Image: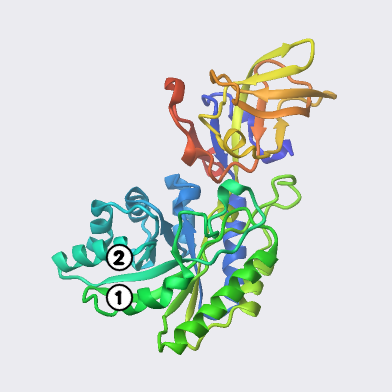
Amino acid sequence: MKGLFPIEKFGHIRTPFYYYDTELLRKTLDTIKEEAQKHEGFCVHYAIKANANPKVLRYIREAGFGADCVSGGEVEASLRAGFPASKIVYAGVGKSDWEINLGLDNDIFCFNVESIPELNVINELAHQKGKIARVAFRLNPNVGAHTHANITTGLAENKFGIDMRDMVKVMEETANMENIKVVGLHFHIGSQILDMGDFEALCNRINDLQLELERHHLTVEHINVGGGLGIDYQHPNRVPIPDFKSYFNTFAKKLKLRPGQTLHFELGRSVVAQCGTLITRTLYVKEGYVKKFAIVDAGFTDLIRPALYQAYHKIENLSSDEASESYDVVGPICESTDVFAKQIDLNKVHRDDLIAIRSAGAYGEIMASSYNCRTLPQGYTSDEFV
């Protein structure tokens, strides 16, 4: 495992920092392309919200992927990284006027619209510019996903999307909007999904909706099923690349596309999570009466997932081959929730040991904050250590 990291070259770098294995990223991108290209009309966009490090984005753009954005800042980041505007999709429940105008000015592929009030604003702003806005309606299919409650998005109780029962009415109202062109339907049921049955349930709901739309003589050019495919946080070395074959095959077999329809995906976590590791340094080993603490210089300001979602990340001591001992791995933030793991086995930890927190390439660096006036972590690629 230690051979995965050039730790002899880490000494001069201020910790904590993110380390991205570009060889694994390339293999992951190649696998996605290989599996998607087996099916006609499958188009992949990368969800920028997972990781917007410019170096990482460059590899993804070079692989030919589109970009899925949820803010004007992400649209700008995508354009800076060289993603063609014709491959940029912009979603989000709360698009401000400047963000919508940004998308219109750059002629992005489409807006994923989540409410009628938003649609009216897009139509008005497009009219002011003399443009036609391409839109896809994000629908809430009321499909549950077997994942953490905080990252489900497809239930009726969630804030996302338009209720499927209103779809026909919405489509008919849109026909009267001169500056709107409806090109698709968009869905997203959650994140870190490993049960293909959840995606099958989504396919069934989409199939029913297409039939309902056709009864009203309504059709769309493309279907967007979002992303959501999970990774193996328990075994990043054994399963570094998610099961993209089963993922794409599920939609190919269960979703009944119409002739000429394209199918769009918005993969994020599954693209970048396993290639990223948070490298942190041990500040102190504190022995109490009940447990032993490995106090590191990274905190939830650098990786918030364990504090926010009680998420598991495999943690390894890169500096020690000594026998394992049990530790709570904690950070320096003045909050009790600043804990990466409790009572885990690590090779005996000493001050200055380098600790690797694995599978942190998604929702790691991008969610970092400066709470406690801390410096944001830097991100480095393996290519920089050659």
Left/right of residue 63 with respect to residue 273 in the rendered view: left
Indicate the secondary structure of the residue bearing disc 2.
Answer: helix
Question: In terms of image quadrants, where is residue 276?
Answer: top right
Indicate the secondary structure of the residue bearing disc 1.
Answer: helix
Tell me which amino acid carries mark 2: Leu
Q: Are marks 1 and 2 in contact (CB under 8 Å)?
A: yes
- The answer to whether residue 70 is visible is yes
Question: In terms of image quadrants, where is residue 206?
Answer: bottom right
N-term-proximal mark, 1 vs 2:
2
Left/right of residue 347 with respect to residue 307 in the rendered view: right
Residue 268 drawn above or below residue 126 = above
Q: Which residue is mark 1?
A: 174
Mark number displayed over residue 119: 2
- Closest to the observer: 47 or 15? 47
Mark 1, residues whose alpha carbon is within 10 Å: few (<14), some, or many (≥20)?
some
- Closest to the observer: 153 or 247? 153
Tell me which amino acid carries mark 1: Thr
